[in-house]
Amino acid sequence: MSEPTQPSREYLAAPVLKIGALAWLKDNLFNSWYNSLLTVITLLGLWYLVPPFFKWAFVDSLWNSSAEACRDIDGACWSIIPNNIKFIILGFFPNGEEWRPLLAMFLLLALVVYSKERSRWNKYLGWFWVSGLIVMGTLMYGGIFGMTVVETAQWSGLPLTMMLSFFGMVAAYPLGVLLALGRRSKMPAIKTLCVVYIEMIRGVPLISLLFMSSIMFPLFLPDGMTIDKVLRAQVAIILFTAAYIAEVVRGGLQAMPRGQYEAADSLGLNYRQTMRLIILPQALKIVIPPTVGILLSAFKDTSLVVIIALYDVLKTTKVTLSNPKWTGYSTEAYIFLAVLYFICCYAMSSYSRRLEKELHTGY
Amino acid sequence: MTETQPKDASAPIIKIVAMHKWYGDFHVLSDINLEVQPKERIVICGPSGSGKSTLIRCINRLEEHQQGQIIVNGTELTNDIKNIEKVRAEVGMVFQHFNLFPHLSILENLTLGQIWVRKTPKKQAEETAMMYLEKVKIAEQALKFPGQLSGGQQQRVAIARSLCMAPEVMLFDEPTSALDPEMIKEVLDVMIDLAEEGMTMLVVTHEMGFAKSVADRVMFMDEGQIVEQNNPHDFFDNPQHERTKLFLSQIL
């Protein structure tokens, strides 16, 4: 690369400044008086918080006991979880049929995990998904192979949360991309339509959309015609999330240099090819971080369906807590839920980071 | 005027008649008349803002003209998207900033147009791609990504990408202006080879050495007009217009 300035160039190792734990402490925690102060305050705070929490959660706690036994202890009553696990996770799904939602959830999880590798993204995977979803739907609804029919009104708990958020994300993403492309369209009608849609949806809270879907929308339907309530909530979530995705994707589209369009044009690619092969792969990659942000909040926002009387996993937990036997152990129950939500969210965000790394081609 | 005209051997491959273009109120190209014969090599020079890039970008409709006619290989450029795509597939273009597709490997950059526009089978497209990569002396980089290549290598890939479409005409828009000096030569060498093989070329460049040795015709543009055109010998040794003389005195 560069020419040597002398006959034999000496390659020096990068300087090693300081080694050892003490040096690390000094460099990172006590390198100035205010950082030292912050370190001390933080350590004090941890000292006051961590041991009592540890004692409460692990030392004085009961993990699998009756509600009565919990009355006599000072620590956490984790027993609320194993004692109510069936209702928290599966809600009102009929007794004796628990294997069906469990199997459906397992199937969904397995498909998601299997789809993680980009090398497996091909036509067959698409068919896997289609057949997988049909099997899941059949498992949940029943009606054939001797399985009793379980109306969607009885779908609740974790399967409901998973379904609303999974379809919410999977359907909202392509819809959002289309809306973003539409908003940048040169055709005024399409552009206006997309702008109005995006701004209207973003102008109202999700709760109001859910209310509309559950209370107002049926008023406009002819007598006797009903649309499933879960489906209506699902559509509301999809429409809502898509509007936010659209704006993020539009940001990505705007970040694309004009030269990419020109290069594609000069090869003779048409609009659809240009978008599909050149622009979207790059633009969508750029906006992975904000997109994941939106998907994460969409996932968490599914718990808002409680206001239209759907029992997602947060609501089933609340119902459990309203049982006089278990009232008073809300901290434990909510910590359990928080861990559940955290695992899902963390898995999504770390997957997105991996995807970003894989798609990085050095530009 | 019909949109497609019969071709004959002596017909110009590019014909521009009384063409004007405006950016808003700014009259960027004024009364351009130009005929390019097959295998002709034209170098266009001129001060910045003179409209030389805009002119060649009109030839594959990256820019739209508002008046006059542009006919490329018998197809007139109008608003008809079919005609535009047809012309674009026949006219290759090399950009100042390469404009390779950074998310695709070098090989994929070269096969993309063949597969999607020419509908060539993938295997055959890859063979063609490797042949042109060989030709621009960069075959060993086929599986790398554009971001891993030097500027000169990227520009050679960009030339190969255009050649894969088997174009009738190649347009070069300042192909060496964004390159470090030591890389200019490797790109010019590829262009000289191409000229020797009889490719029709329109080159916007400040490389006067290239113009002298390769061009059949050198064209000087200023303020949106073709001020002077001549064979390189007369153009450089005996310029007719004051503006040409001034420009040449500044750059030579």
Image (cartoon, grey):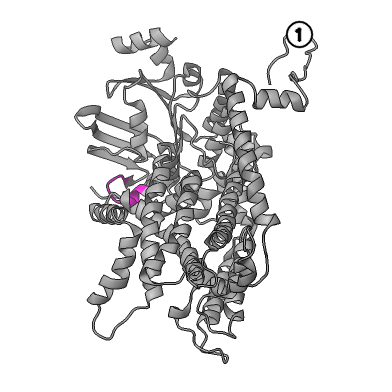
Q: Which residue is denoted by mark 1 in the rendering?
A: A6
Magenta stretch bounds = B76-84
- Residue B66 image position (x, y, % from top left): 22, 38
Q: Is residue A130 above or below residue B117?
A: below
Is any atom of residue A91 visible in this view?
A: yes
- Among the 4 quarters of the image, the one containing residue A325: bottom right
- Please indicate, yes or no, whether residue A110 appears anywhere in the rendered image: no
Q: Quadrant of the C terminus of chain B?
A: top left
- Identify residue type, mark 1: Gln
> On the rendered structure, is A188 left or right of A180?
left
Q: Residue at x 52, y 62 (%)?
A: A330
Which residue is most to the bottom? Answer: A146
Of B10 and A222, the residue lying toward us: A222
Q: Is residue B42 left or right of residue B115?
A: left
Decide whether residue B79 is among the magenta residues: yes
Residue B151 in picture, x, y percent from top left: 56, 28
Residue A235 in percent (x, y) is at 38, 67
Q: Quadrant of residue B48?
A: top left
| Residue A307 shown in magenta | no
Relative placement, left or right, of A185 versus A356 is left
Left or right: where B239 falls relative to A312: left
> What chain does mark 1 sit on?
A
